[in-house]
Amino acid sequence: MARFAAQVESTAALAVDTGFAWLMSSATTGYKLRRVTIGCVAGAGVPTSQQVVVGINRVTSAGTTPTAGMTPAKLDPNSAAAGAVWNTAYSAAPTNTANDQWRIPFNTQSSADLPWELLEEWAVALGTANGLAFINRDNALPASHKYVLSVEWEE
């Protein structure tokens, strides 16, 4: 199985319950989430100390018109291109399940690094309506603050 990585910086002062990244399966490829690393930057200054929460939510329908994203990086340059798609904006975002599957609480002056390996497998089935959404929860980010999110997955 090949591994891939993608990253994003959210918009500044992200509002509560706002999605800022989606890792979507393709019609032919599912994936297993293997690592999530997240932190905060605040422009040229030190981040304001604030508790924040990012929810990871399963997607139940595909969004329309992705307007941003990046080509996933191959962690092994000998592997084929990624089947999963990394999007950071939509004209109409994908629909999510009612509750977060996982919540990542941390302080804006720290970061979180969560590996899902071995017994902690998190599988997403193939199909364009399947994926994971990363959503700001509980508190809006302060002015000029952005999330920096990196994900790693295996196909």
Image (cartoon, rainbow, N blue to C red):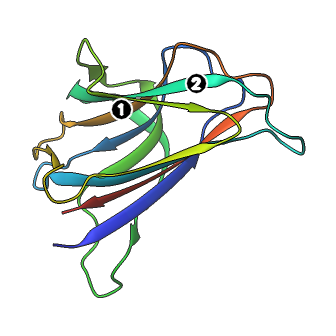
- Residue 62 coordinates in the image, percent (x, y): 25, 30
Left or right position of 119 against 40: left
Residue that numbered label 2 is attached to: 52
User: Which numbered disc flags the more N-terminal residue, 2 or 1?
Assistant: 2
Q: Is residue 28 above or below residue 136?
A: below
Q: Are marks 2 and 1 in contact (CB under 8 Å)?
A: no
Residue at 53% x, 13% y is 138
Q: Amino acid at mark 1?
A: Ala
Residue at 25% x, 81% y is 79
Q: Amino acid at mark 2?
A: Val
Q: Is residue 69 above or below residue 138?
A: below
Q: Nearer the viewer, residue 121 or 26?
A: 121
Q: Is residue 61 at all visible to an observer of this figure?
A: no
Left or right position of 52 against 144: left
Left or right position of 135 against 9: left
- Kindly state the secondary structure of the residue where label 2 is placed: strand
Residue that numbered label 1 is attached to: 133
